[in-house]
C-alpha cells in the first residue's frame, strides 16, 4: 500500500473563489496537522493490533503535498492487514465508503512470493509466539483457504480525524 490521496470534494471549486495564495499556508497547516494525527493514530492501531516485528509500524507514513497530504504504509502486506483477505476482505470492504472500496480493489488478488516463502515467514511468526515451527504449514493452508480478518489502521485513523480537518479548514478566516 504505497499510499492513498484523500481529496476533499469541492475544495478546488471553493478555493477558486478566493486568493488561495494568501491562505495557502494556513490551509496547508491544516493538512499537515491532519496528516500528523492520521499517522500517529494509524501507528497506534498497528502497534496494538497487528505488528509483531515492527516492520509495518515503521512503514506507516504521511507526506504533506501542496494543499494535500498523502498517507499510507509501504510494506507489501499492508493492504492485507488493512482490508483482510478472501471472505473477510469481501465482508469488510463492502462496509467502507465507495472511494475506499475502489482503493481496496487495487489490492485484490494474490500477493507476491511463493507458498514456500509464505510458510517460511510463518515459521518466523511461530518462533516469535512460542509455537512449534511444524504449525507453520497448516496455518498457511488455513490462511489460504479462509483468509485473514482485517485489522484496519489507516481507514479508522482517517475517519476519526477528518471532522477535525474540516473544522480546522472552516476556522480559517477567508
Image (cartoon, rainbow, N blue to C red):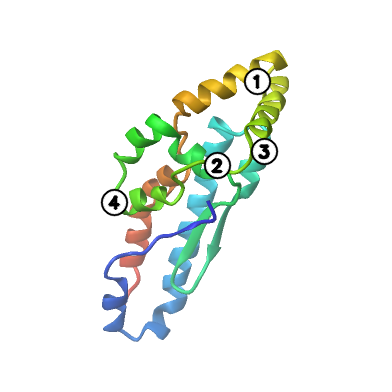
* Residue 109 locus on image (x, y percent): 46, 43
* Residue 100 locus on image (x, y percent): 36, 50
Camera-nearest residue between 94 and 30: 94
161 to 17, vertically: above or below: above
Residue at image point 54% right, 47% down: 40
* Residue 107 locus on image (x, y percent): 46, 47
Q: Which residue is mark 4?
A: 98
Q: Which residue is mark 1?
A: 136
On residue 54, which mark appears?
A: 3
165 to 173, vertically: above or below: above
Q: Kindly indicate the quadrant of the structure image that contains residue 92.
A: top left
172 to 33, vertically: above or below: below
Quadrant location, the C terminus: bottom left
Q: Residues within 10 Å of mark 3 (few under 14, many from 20)?
A: few
Q: Residues within 10 Å of mark 4 (few under 14, many from 20)?
A: few
Q: Which element is circle 3 on?
A: loop
Residue at image point 27% right, 70% down: 10
Amino acid at each position: 500500500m504505497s499510499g492513498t490521496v484523500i481529496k476533499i470534494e469541492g475544495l478546488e471549486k471553493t478555493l477558486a473563489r478566493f486568493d488561495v495564495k494568501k491562505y495557502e499556508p494556513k490551509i496547508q497547516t491544516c493538512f499537515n496537522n491532519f496528516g500528523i494525527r492520521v499517522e500517529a493514530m494509524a501507528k497506534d492501531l498497528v502497534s496494538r493490533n497487528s505488528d509483531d516485528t515492527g516492520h509495518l509500524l515503521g512503514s506507516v507514513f504521511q507526506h504533506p503535498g501542496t494543499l494535500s497530504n498523502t498517507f499510507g504504509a509501504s510494506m507489501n502486506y499492508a493492504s492485507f492487514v488493512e482490508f483482510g483477505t478472501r471472505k473477510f476482505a469481501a465482508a469488510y470492504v463492502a462496509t467502507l465508503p465507495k472511494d475506499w472500496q475502489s482503493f481496496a480493489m487495487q489490492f485484490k488478488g494474490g500477493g507476491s512470493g511463493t507458498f514456500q516463502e509464505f510458510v517460511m515467514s510463518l515459521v518466523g511468526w511461530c518462533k516469535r509466539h512460542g509455537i512449534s515451527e511444524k504449525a507453520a504449514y497448516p496455518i498457511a493452508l488455513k490462511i489460504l483457504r479462509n483468509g485473514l480478518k482485517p485489522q484496519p489502521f489507516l481507514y479508522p485513523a482517517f475517519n476519526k480525524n477528518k471532522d477535525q480537518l474540516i473544522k480546522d479548514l472552516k476556522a480559517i478566516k477567508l
